[in-house]
Amino acid sequence: MSKTVVVTGAGSGIGKAIATVAAQRDWRVVVTDIDLDAATAVAAGLDDPAGLGHEATQLDVTDPAQAAMVADDIADRLGLDAWMSNAGISFMVPFLDVSLDNYDLTMDINLKGVFICGQAAARAMVRTGRRGTIVNTASMAGKQGRVPYLSDYVASKHGVVGLTQAMAYELAEHGITVNCVCPGFVATPMQSRELDWEAQLRGTTPDKVKQMWIDDTPLGRLQQPEDVAYTVAFLLSDDARFITGEALAVNGGAYMD
């Protein structure tokens, strides 16, 4: 019997890789993104040997009504077996210069969005009797504060780790597992922007910043989106059904706890 997973922020980067790997593992994937064109392009390119019919839909993760509509629609039509809250943003600014507008936007998408979508998904799962799985994208920045120029991002990702544990505790009685992944230096469009920002802030070049990140990673390379996606695939699988409330580090050893 086919299973269905909704992935947010799946129009590019880590979310796209998660959708791709999930499809390869015979999941029906609902690709969501605030950019509908990007989501549609990803869904169209997913493997579908079993003819499951992957879908794409627009989703602003900060909109509770839209999140509930997506979760309820999928739960009623296809069965909502898993929800992957991946959408996120970042800005690199010294702490003293972080604007409240940027802080609010970071928290709205990275933390409130995880809360809104997690609540919508869990309500749909409980209503339809699904013992489902929720996975959130946190970060190694959610386990430490030693991350320069990303204070608002650090705060949001610490929040995701704590929220994941709270969700896991309360949803366990419904048979719903909740975990998060904590990636490191992942080669994505977001990282490309961060390389440029950090180089400017440090007065150096993006190549030198990239090498610094590689030097900070014991496995000796930048992380690829697929490294995260394979870990998420495990957390979505039956092999992980007795794992809940965990913040699983997948960062090549760049941060160990």
Image: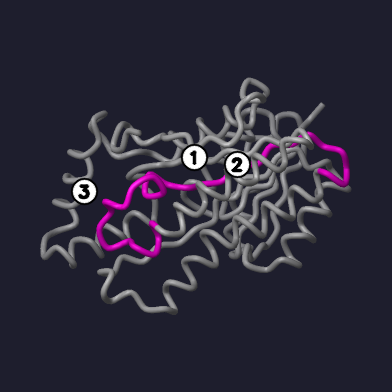
Left or right of 110 on screen, residue 81: right
SS under mark 3: helix
Crowd class of label 1 (few under 14; some 14 to 19; many from 20; radius 10 Å): many
- Kind of residue sitting beneath label 2: Val
| Residue 210: numbered disc | 3
- Kind of residue sitting beneath label 3: Lys
How many angstroms separate mark 2 from mark 1 (CA)?
7 Å
| Residue 181: numbered disc | 1
Q: Quadrant of the C terminus?
A: top left
**Residue where numbered disc 2 is placed:** 135
Left or right of 42 on screen, residue 253: left
SS under mark 2: strand
What segment is highlighted magenta in the picture? 126-154
Quarter residue 215 falls in: top left
Residue found farthest to the top:
239
Quarter residue 196 falls in: bottom left
